[in-house]
Image: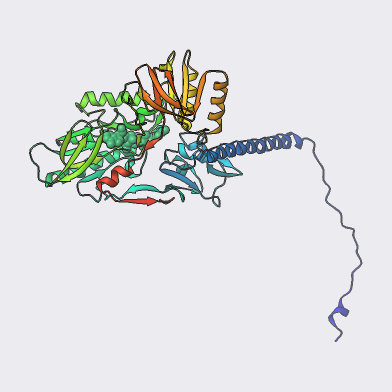
C-alpha cells in the first residue's frame, strides 16, 4: 500500500478564478448619499451634545453640585444603549445627558425624582436610588401605616423618601386612615387633639382633608404658606403631576399646570372644604408628656394623641441670625424678579441661587443690586452664573461685596462689615440665599429612627 500522499494527484487548473462582475449603478448614489449625510450629521450632533453634556457635568463637579437631594437615577453603563429615551422623558429637561454614548446624570442637584427616566429606559439600565456613596440620605423607618418607631408619630410625603406631588397626596390620604384608627384607641382629654398635622404641602393638605372627612379634631400648622415646596418655585414654573385622589374632592386630573394654577387650586380647596391651616407658625419641638404629644410652635402649645409630620425634605432656610432679620423686607427665596424693579436690593450668599437671584433682579429696570458673600470667591456656584455675574458687575449693574458679612438690617438700610471695614448700604429689600437646614436634627430630637442610604434603593 503506497503512502496516502502518493495517491494524491494534483489536477491541472482548468479555469482561472474570475471575480463576479460588479455593475455599479450611479443611481444608487441617490439613496446612499443622503443616508451618509444623515449618518454624518447624527455623529456630529451626538458628539456636540456629548461635549455639551460633559461641560455641564464638569461645571457642576467644580462647583461641588454633585449630590442629588433624594431619589435619583443611577445608570448601568453595561446596559445603557445611549438611545436618549431617558433624556427626553425627564419632565425637568436637561437633567440627564448622553456622554460618550451612555446616559449620565449631569445636573444631580436639580433632579426631583420623577423617575420618568427609569420608566422610559428600554433596557432597564436605570435604577432609582437614595443618596450616593459619599453622601448618605437619612430615610425614616416607617411601618406600612406610615408610623415611625415613636408610637403615634406618623410621617407622610417627601420626608418619607418618595418625592412628587401625587405620592405626597396619596401618602397623606392613607396615613390619616391609620391615624384615625390609632386615635380612636388612645385616651383623650380636655383640649387634646386627635392629630396635629405639621406641614401644609400636598401631603399635609390631603391628610387635613381626610381628617375633616373622618371628623377628627385636628390642627394643621405650616411655618410658611399654602402649597408646600411648590409655593417657592419661581413664577410660572410648570409642575407635572399625575392624577391623584383627594379626600372630600375626588380625583384631581392635573398633568401639567403652572405653579400659580396649582396654588389657586389649593386656595379653592380651602374655600370649598372650610380647611383653615395656621400659616407662618413653625413647630419648634415635640415631646411626649404623659400619654400625649406636646407640640410647641412659634405661637402656641398643643396637645395631641398623634402627630403627622408632612414637612417635606427641602428644609428650612438658614437664617443670618442678625438684628432686623424679622423685618418684612427680608425673604429667603427669589420668586418674582419683576417685583424688585426700581428697588435697592441686597442679595446675601455665594451659591447658585444667590448669583441667579442677583442677576435676574439686576436685569429688571431701575434696580440697584448688591451681593454680599463672606467668601473671597464664588467657588460653590456654576461657571455660567459666575460669568453672568461678572458681566453685570462690569456693566455696573451689580455691586460685588466679597469678603463681607451682614451685621444689621434696618428698614431703609443694611449695615455690613466689608473687608473688616464697616459700611452702610441704602436698601429696600434683602434676599438671603444661605442654604437650608435639613429636618434631620429635628427628627433626631423627637427620637425618630432613620436609615442612612448610600446609593441604595
Ligand atoms: C425645583 C423643584 C421642582 C419640582 N417639580 C415637581 C414637579 O414638577 N412635579 C412633582 O410632582 N413634584 C415636583 N417636585 C417635588 C415636589 O415639590 C415635592 O415632592 C412635594 O412638594 C412634596 O410634598 P410634601 O407635602 O411632602 O412636602 P412639601 O411640599 O415640601 O411641604 C412641606 C411643608 O412643611 C412645612 N414645614 C417644614 N418644616 C416645618 C416646621 N418645622 N413647622 C411647620 N411647618 C413646616 C413647609 O413650610 C412646607 O410648606 C419638585 C421639587 C423641586 C424642589
How far across and how far down the image is residue 315, in percent?
35, 37
Q: Nearer the viewer, residue 214 or 417?
A: 417
Q: Nearer the viewer, residue 181 or 228?
A: 228
Q: Which residue is at the far front?
A: 421
Residue at 32% across, 32% down: 228
Residue 238 visible at all:
yes
Residue at 23% across, 26% down: 270
Q: Looking at the picture, does residue 365 appear above or below residue 391?
A: above
How far across and how far down the image is residue 375, in percent?
49, 33
Q: Is residue 222 left or right of residue 455?
A: left
Q: Nearer the viewer, residue 335 or 20?
A: 335
Ligand 1's quadrant: top left
How far across and how far down the image is residue 57, in percent?
55, 39
Residue at 57% across, 38% down: 53
The quadrant where residue 227 appears: top left
Q: Is residue 23 left or right of residue 108?
A: right
Residue 243 visible at all:
no
The quadrant where residue 59 appears: top right
How far across and how far down the image is residue 199, in percent?
27, 35
Residue at 43% across, 19% down: 425
Quadrant into which the N terminus falls = bottom right
Q: Is residue 270 left or right of residue 355?
A: left
Amino acid at each position: 500500500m503506497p503512502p496516502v500522499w502518493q495517491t494524491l494527484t494534483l489536477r491541472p487548473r482548468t479555469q482561472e478564478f474570475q471575480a463576479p462582475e460588479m455593475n455599479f449603478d450611479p443611481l444608487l448614489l441617490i439613496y446612499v448619499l443622503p443616508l451618509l449625510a444623515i449618518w454624518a450629521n447624527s455623529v456630529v450632533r451626538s458628539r456636540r451634545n456629548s461635549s455639551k453634556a460633559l461641560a455641564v457635568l464638569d461645571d457642576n463637579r467644580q462647583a461641588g453640585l454633585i449630590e442629588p437631594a433624594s431619589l435619583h437615577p443611577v445608570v448601568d453603563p453595561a446596559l445603557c444603549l445611549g438611545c436618549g429615551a431617558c433624556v427626553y422623558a425627564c419632565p425637568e429637561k436637561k437633567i440627564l445627558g448622553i456622554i460618550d454614548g451612555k446616559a449620565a446624570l449631569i445636573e444631580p442637584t436639580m433632579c426631583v425624582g420623577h423617575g420618568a427616566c427609569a420608566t422610559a429606559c428600554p433596557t432597564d439600565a436605570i435604577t432609582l436610588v437614595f443618596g450616593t456613596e459619599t453622601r448618605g440620605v437619612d430615610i425614616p423607618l416607617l411601618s406600612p401605616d406610615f408610623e415611625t418607631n415613636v408610637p403615634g408619630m406618623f410621617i407622610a410625603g417627601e420626608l418619607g423618601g418618595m418625592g412628587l406631588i401625587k405620592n405626597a397626596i396619596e401618602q397623606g390620604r392613607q396615613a390619616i386612615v391609620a391615624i384615625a384608627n390609632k386615635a380612636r384607641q388612645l385616651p383623650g382629654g380636655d383640649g387634646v387633639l386627635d392629630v396635629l398635622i405639621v406641614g401644609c404641602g400636598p401631603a399635609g393638605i390631603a391628610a387635613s382633608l381626610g381628617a375633616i372627612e373622618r371628623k377628627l379634631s385636628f390642627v394643621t400648622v405650616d411655618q410658611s404658606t399654602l402649597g408646600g415646596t411648590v409655593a417657592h418655585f419661581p413664577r410660572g414654573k410648570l409642575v407635572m403631576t399625575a392624577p391623584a385622589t383627594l379626600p372630600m374632592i375626588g380625583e384631581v386630573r392635573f398633568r401639567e399646570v403652572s405653579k400659580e394654577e396649582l396654588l389657586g387650586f389649593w386656595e379653592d380647596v380651602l374655600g370649598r372644604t372650610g380647611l383653615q391651616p395656621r400659616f407662618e407658625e413653625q413647630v419648634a419641638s415635640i415631646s411626649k408628656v404623659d400619654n400625649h404629644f406636646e407640640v410647641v410652635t412659634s405661637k402656641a402649645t398643643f396637645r395631641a394623641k398623634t402627630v403627622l409630620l408632612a414637612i417635606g425634605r427641602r428644609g428650612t432656610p438658614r437664617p443670618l441670625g442678625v438684628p432686623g432679620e424679622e423685618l418684612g423686607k427680608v425673604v429667603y427665596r427669589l420668586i418674582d424678579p419683576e417685583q424688585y424693579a426700581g428697588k435697592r436690593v441686597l442679595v446675601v450668599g455665594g451659591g447658585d441661587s444667590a448669583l441667579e437671584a442677583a442677576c435676574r433682579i439686576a436685569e429688571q429696570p431701575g434696580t440697584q443690586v448688591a451681593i454680599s458673600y463672606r467668601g473671597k470667591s464664588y467657588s460653590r456656584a456654576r461657571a455660567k452664573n459666575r460669568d453672568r455675574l461678572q458681566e453685570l458687575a462690569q456693566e455696573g449693574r451689580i455691586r460685588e461685596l466679597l469678603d463681607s458679612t451682614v451685621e444689621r438690617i434696618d428698614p431703609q438700610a443694611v449695615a455690613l462689615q466689608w473687608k473688616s471695614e464697616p459700611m452702610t448700604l441704602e436698601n429696600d429689600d434683602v434676599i438671603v440665599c444661605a442654604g437650608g437646614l435639613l429636618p434631620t436634627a429635628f427628627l433626631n430630637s423627637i427620637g425618630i429612627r432613620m436609615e442612612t442610604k448610600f446609593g441604595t434603593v
